[in-house]
Amino acid sequence: MGKVAFITGILGQDGSYLADFLLSKGYTVYGMKRRLSHEHENNIKHARDQITLVSGDLLDHTSLIQCIKKCQPDEVYNLAAQSFVPESWAQPVYTGDVTGLGVLRMLEAIKEVNPAIRFYQASSSEMFGKALETPQRESTPFYPRSPYGVAKVYGHYATVNHRESYNAFACSGILFNHESPRRGMEFVTRKITNQAAKISAGMATQLALGNLNAKRDWGFALDYVEAMWMMLQQERPDDYVVATGQTHSVREFVELAFKRLGMNITWEGEGVNERGLVDGKAVVIVDKKFYRPADVEQLVGDASKAGAQLGWKQRTSFPELVNMMVDNDVKMLKSGGS
Ligand code: NDP
Ligand code: GDR
């Protein structure tokens, strides 16, 4: 008999790729979906008939118990979160409740219904924040810089604590930024590729961004969901960093995206006055409103533990990722999407 997986956050970027990956491994896949005023099942529409959606919310402990009872999973992947960092300053308590306490609610639901279930927690490089060493590894101390990062640290330690207190098979995957054509439009990579595609098609004239100097370790989401699965197939539960080991600035991402569209950017000015020019016209501008109260300036991960113990490796390079996202947005615009 194939295994059963229950994925929270299945309609998001990672949840949808993980569902594809687990279906290809013969899993029965259940996903949790909260009640929203608008349906948005775009990311899973190609596999919709193979996935069973159940109703629940990380804010509602009872709903989690009911979900676990209904699906009887072998593995739970907790990918749901309020995951957009800037929103966590606008809604700090809500973010703490969903992204932090929500993890504990799920762990407690599993303990109550079936403690043998294997659990994956979607932890984040944002926990390293103002990084205390470079590159960041499993032993690097945390220094979160946003209410989101603080909530993820809570979720991480709740996971570790259930492992140490109750012998739970609970793993925390500390994943660095990973992107894809399914990335939400508000995150910087997708915002860039989508707007660049529009500019190239004559449907927009400018791209407004915040901190161009921020550097991230960007990988491809499909490569990363494999690491989540690998963690739950080990003999013993543990925590792992998943990253590419390379870091690039937002500015570099912009340059590559426009280059893919045949536009070469040159830069002039500094800080909020910096502009990216194509043929003398400012196509990239800086807008203060996209600056954060406290930013994470640079992240770069050391995934050697995941490489040595899980056999995980990155398959998609940074330029391949940028090109894939740009090409997808060009195609989407041509077919009438936005
Ligand atoms: P997305 O924002 O694309 O997906 C998050 C999902 O969580 C959404 O489908 C959302 O549902 C769901 N969700 C939000 N609030 C609740 C709630 N109260 N109850 C139930 N579901 C809820 O995130 P990603 O796929 O990019 O990331 C997956 C996880 O990994 C997140 O926890 C994120 O914080 C973490 N992470 C992501 C990284 C990345 O680079 N992508 C890196 C490191 C960690 P709805 O569709 O209804 O809004
Ligand atoms: P991040 O991703 O905060 O790292 O969190 P995001 O793409 O939002 O920002 C990355 C960096 O780009 C800078 N930036 C901008 N960001 C956005 N969103 N919009 C802009 O216009 C803009 N201009 C510059 C930001 O200042 C930042 O430094 C993501 C999420 O997926 C989290 O859930 C996850 O935990 C981490 O990655 C790892």
Image (tube, grey):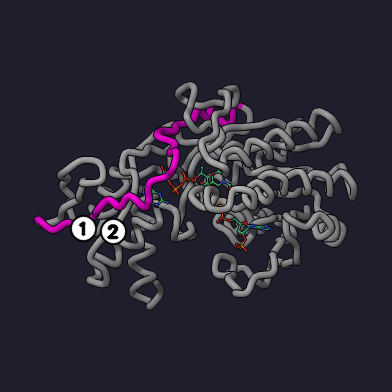
The amino acid at mark 2 is Leu
The answer to whether 122 is drawn above or below residue 10 in the figure is above
Q: Is residue 205 left or right of residue 44?
A: left
Is there a contact, CB below 8 Å, between mark 2 and mark 1? yes
Q: In the displayed image of the protein, which residue is found farthest to the left?
A: 280
As helix, strand or loop, the secondary structure at mark 2 comes to strand
CB of mark 2 near ligand 2 (< 8 Å): no
Q: Which residues, given as a range, are shown in magenta? A: 280-308
The residue that appears at 62% across and 53% down in the rendered structure is 18
Residue 1 in sight from this viewpoint:
no
**Residue 40 at what x, y percent from top left?**
58, 71
**Residue 246 at what x, y percent from top left?**
40, 33
Nearest the eye: 47 or 184:
184
Q: Is residue 86 left or right of residue 11?
A: left
**Does the magenta portion include 97?**
no
Q: Is residue 150 left or right of residue 188?
A: right
**Does the magenta portion include 301?**
yes
**Residue 196 at what x, y percent from top left?**
29, 60
Cα separation, mark 2 vs mark 1, equals: 6 Å
Q: Is residue 289 left or right of residue 159?
A: left
The residue beneath circle 2 is 207
The residue that appears at 89% across and 50% down in the rendered structure is 113
Disc number placed over residue 283 in the picture, else none: 1
Q: Residues within 10 Å of mark 1 (few under 14, many from 20)?
A: some
The amino acid at mark 1 is Val
Q: Residues within 10 Å of mark 2 (few under 14, many from 20)?
A: many
